[in-house]
Image (cartoon, helix red, strand yellow):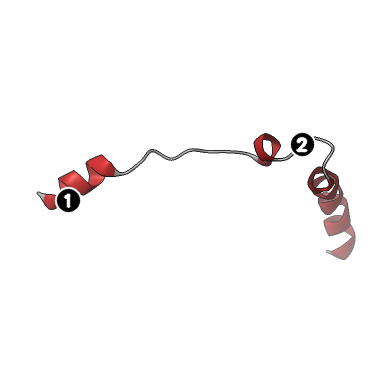
Amino acid sequence: MMTRNLIAEIDPLEMITIDQLVPQNHLVHKLESIIPIYAKYIS
């Protein structure tokens, strides 16, 4: 019975993206756009 109470108290999962956290002109977005290009050259 204790398991049912624990399951009822778990918070729902919330999905957030990098776009919601970081301004569009931030360096993180610039790096994110470069990484796939760089990965192509090192593989």
Q: Which label sits on residue 23?
A: 2
The residue furthest left is: 1
The vertical placement of 28 against 24, above or below, is below
Q: Residue at x 83, y 58 (%)?
A: 39
Q: Earlier in the sequence, mark 2 or mark 1?
A: 1
**Horizontally, is 36 left or right of 16 in the view?**
right
**Horizontally, is 4 left or right of 39 in the view?**
left
| Spatial CA span between label 2 and label 1 | 42 Å
The residue furthest right is: 41
Give residue 27's position: percent from left, percent from top.
84, 47
Kind of residue at disc 2: Pro
Q: Residues within 10 Å of mark 2 (few under 14, many from 20)?
A: few
Give residue 30's position: percent from left, percent from top.
85, 45
Q: Which label sits on residue 21?
A: none
Q: Quadrant of the C terminus?
A: bottom right
Give residue 34's position: percent from left, percent from top.
87, 49
Give residue 10's position: percent from left, percent from top.
31, 44
Q: Which label sits on residue 3?
A: 1
Kind of residue at disc 1: Thr
Picture quadrant of residue 7: top left
Q: Residue at x 80, y 35 (%)?
A: 24
Q: Are marks 2 and 1 in contact (CB under 8 Å)?
A: no
Q: Residues within 10 Å of mark 1 (few under 14, many from 20)?
A: few
Picture quadrant of residue 18: top right
Which structural element holds mark 1?
helix
Which structural element holds mark 2?
loop
